[in-house]
Image (spheres, helix red, strand yellow):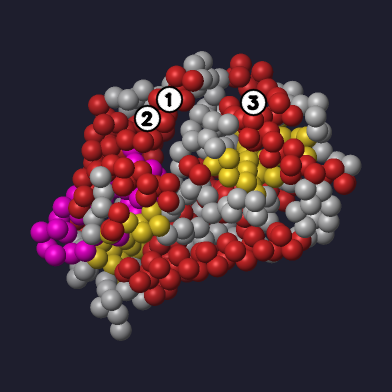
Amino acid sequence: MYSTKVLVAQLGARKHYQEPALFHQWGILDRFYTDIYAGNNPIYNLLRHPKIYTYLPNSFKKALDRYEASLQNANIIQFPIFGYQYIKAVKQSSLEEVSQIFVWGAQQFCHKILQHGIGNINTIYGFNSACLELFQYAKDRNIGCILDQTLADYSLVYKLLLEEEEKWIGWSLTPFKINNSDLKLMEREHHEQDLANHIVCGSSFVKDSLVARGVNANKISVISLGRLKDEEPIDYQNLLSSPQQRGDELKILFVGSVGLRKGIPYLLEALSQIKGQIPFDCKVAGSLEIKSERIAEYSSICEFLGRIPRSQVKDLYRWADVFVLPSICEGSAMVTYEALSLGVPIITTYNSGSLVRDGIDGFIVPIRDSEAIAEKLRKVYTTLYNNEIRKNSQEYLKQILQTSENNLSEILIK
């Protein structure tokens, strides 16, 4: 029997609850604290039935999706009233206020956990910005602290975002500016990093940002956890030729928030460059964070779908010949895991924290380089990503995820 007893504090539904699910599977999860969790009861299960779920409002779907079947017998403690208050506050806040709400919500969440009790645990596993008070409490009681850093350090995030706003003036619906609340949020994360005995991050890009901030590299592990909620085999029947050989358009897909952080202007510039050179059809799925006049400017070469249900996103991956994410700053973008799992070649950046092997599963291009994106799109148009290559990408992803799980277990299990 393992001596490790872990408390997981997870504000929100990050990464499909994969960490608490793994810890429960390993027999080390003592308790799992969260804000809102839709458990396994007859009413929820009925609502999850496809014939009913399809017709539910998106808000209901999001609530029902806060569930992981493998956690059925876990000790889950939730604070739903606080959770709804927090979500409402975030939705109603302006861009200038959102960091203040994040700090308030994280403080309230930690205080509620401490009031409810931590039991006889010896390890706290928390996520960036939402575990500071827990770590402070733990340090006085010889309880180990493991931080899951899901995004690059804010000192780098803020720098990159400000540079993008300066480069693309007049694009953002709400241009990013640093205020005191943003600095407090950054300071909060820095305190968490300093208190943590060990830091887990999803990519070398994130680790690089922490080391640049002054965190000891020896206490950081890159563990690319990207367990997919609904794994499905690849349908290979239509993957026997390149778009050029098919005499078809190159089908280009982008999934994510349509804003500067995800690098959307560089994809749109690349589309303008290949217009008239190769036939293509581009679909962009995600909430719109750029002005309508910019969308109108590129509407002739790109279809902006807005935010769509997860079920339809899967269909888009199956439709696509290539997935493009020219992100400026991420942790380890889950959309790239999803594309890899379905064998879709990917064009992305190092800053996306992707697992893509350059020249094998797709291409890694420099950030802010629309010409490089255009070049790779032309290459994908003429390249046959045959069944063997796609199967290889899928197997590679499975191996990486299994290795990551093993590495995480070595950190935690004693």
**Which residues fall within the magenta stretch?**
125-154
Three-letter amino acid code at the position of disc 3: Glu
- Magenta stretch holds residue 207: no
Q: Nearer the viewer, residue 395 or 87?
A: 395
Residue at coordinates 27% horizontally, 71% vertically from top-left?
A: 5
Mark 3 lies on residue: 269
Mark 2 lies on residue: 159
Q: Note whether residue 305 is visible.
A: no
Q: Give the distance between the C-alpha atoms of the residues marked 1 and 2, in whole angstroms.
A: 6 Å
Q: Are marks 1 and 2 in contact (CB under 8 Å)?
A: yes
Mark 1 lies on residue: 163
Residue 299 rendering spot, x and y as whole percentages? 70, 23
Three-letter amino acid code at the position of disc 2: Lys
Mark 2 secondary-structure assignment: helix
Left or right relative to 64: residue 152? left
Left or right relative to 404: residue 276? right
Work out which quarter of the rendered image holds the C terminus and state it. bottom left
Q: Earlier in the sequence, mark 2 or mark 3?
A: 2
